[in-house]
C-alpha cells in the first residue's frame, strides 16, 4: 500500500512538472516573434552648422536644415529563456529584456535646407557635407531616445501585449518585470 501511495505521488509530481514544462514552452513561443516593435515615433530635428571659425578661410558659411526621423523601439523576445519564467498555478511572472531602439531612419526626401548663407569667397555646403550633418543628426536622435521616453513607452506597450497574450493562455495574475522594476497587471 505504501509503495502505491509513493508511486501515485511521483506520478502526480511528474505530470505537474510536465504540465509546467508545457506551459513554459507555450510562453517561450514569444521567442518566435524575435524583435517586436511596440512603439514608433516621428521626430523632427533642426540641424544647424557653421564653419566661420576656420582662420584660413575668408567668409562665413552657415546652414540650417530640418529633418524628420522615424524611431522604432521594442523588445527582443529572442533573449527570453525558461529561467525568465516562473509559473505558480494561475500566476505567472515573466522577466523581459529592456526595450531597445531597433532603428532610426531619416529618409533623404525628409531632409530640407531651410536656410543657407555663404560668404563671397566660400562654396556652398556639398552633398557629402549635408549627408554628414544628417548622419550626425541621426546619431543624436538615437542617443536622445531614452530622454524622449521612447524606450519607456516601448516597455509599457510590450507589457500590455504580453499581458494580453498570457491572459489568453488562462493566467489570472500576471507580473511583468524589467530588471527588478515590476509592473503588475491584474
Image (cartoon, rainbow, N blue to C red):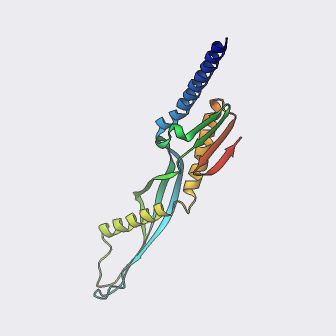
Q: Is residue 101 left or right of residue 165?
A: left
How far from the left and from the top, in percent, is residue 74?
A: 52, 48
Image quarter where the C terminus lies is top right
Which residue corresponds to the image point at 30% horizontal and 81% vertical from the top-left?
122
> In the figure, is residue 85 to the left or right of 171?
left
* Place of residue 50 in the rendered image (x, y in percent of width and height, measured from the top left): 39, 79
Looking at the image, which residue is at 43% across and 55% down?
Answer: 105
Residue 56, quarter of the rendered image: bottom left
Name the outermost residue toward the front: 2
Question: In the depicted view, which residue is nearer to us: 158 or 115?
Answer: 158
User: How many marks overall?
Assistant: 0
Query: In the rendered view of the protein, which quadrant contains the N terminus?
Result: top right
Give me the residue at 31% from left, 67% from top. Answer: 127
Q: Position of residue 159 (x, y in %)?
A: 61, 44
Question: Horizontally, is 119 left or right of 167 in the view?
Answer: left
**Which is nearer the eye, 137 or 64?**
137
Image x and y of residue 168, in percent? 63, 31
Position of residue 105 in the picture relative to residue 87 (left or right): left
Vertical side of 153 occupied by 25: above or below: above
Amino acid at each position: 500500500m505504501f509503495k502505491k501511495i509513493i508511486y501515485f505521488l511521483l506520478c502526480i509530481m511528474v505530470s505537474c512538472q510536465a504540465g509546467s514544462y508545457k506551459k513554459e514552452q507555450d510562453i517561450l513561443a514569444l521567442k518566435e516573434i524575435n524583435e517586436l516593435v511596440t512603439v514608433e515615433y516621428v521626430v523632427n530635428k533642426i540641424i544647424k552648422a557653421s564653419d566661420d571659425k576656420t582662420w584660413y578661410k575668408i567668409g562665413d558659411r552657415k546652414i540650417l536644415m530640418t529633418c524628420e526621423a522615424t524611431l522604432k523601439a521594442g523588445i527582443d523576445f529572442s533573449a527570453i529563456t525558461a529561467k525568465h519564467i516562473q509559473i505558480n498555478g494561475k500566476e505567472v511572472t515573466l522577466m523581459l529584456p529592456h526595450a531597445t531602439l531597433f532603428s532610426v531612419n531619416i529618409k533623404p526626401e525628409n531632409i530640407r535646407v531651410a536656410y543657407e548663407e555663404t560668404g563671397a569667397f566660400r562654396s556652398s555646403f556639398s552633398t557629402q557635407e549635408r549627408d554628414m550633418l544628417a548622419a550626425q543628426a541621426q546619431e543624436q536622435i538615437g542617443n536622445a531616445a531614452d530622454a524622449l521616453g521612447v524606450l519607456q513607452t516601448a516597455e509599457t506597450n510590450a507589457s500590455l501585449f504580453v499581458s494580453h497574450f498570457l491572459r489568453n493562455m488562462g493566467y489570472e495574475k500576471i507580473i511583468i518585470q524589467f530588471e527588478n522594476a515590476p509592473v503588475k497587471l491584474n
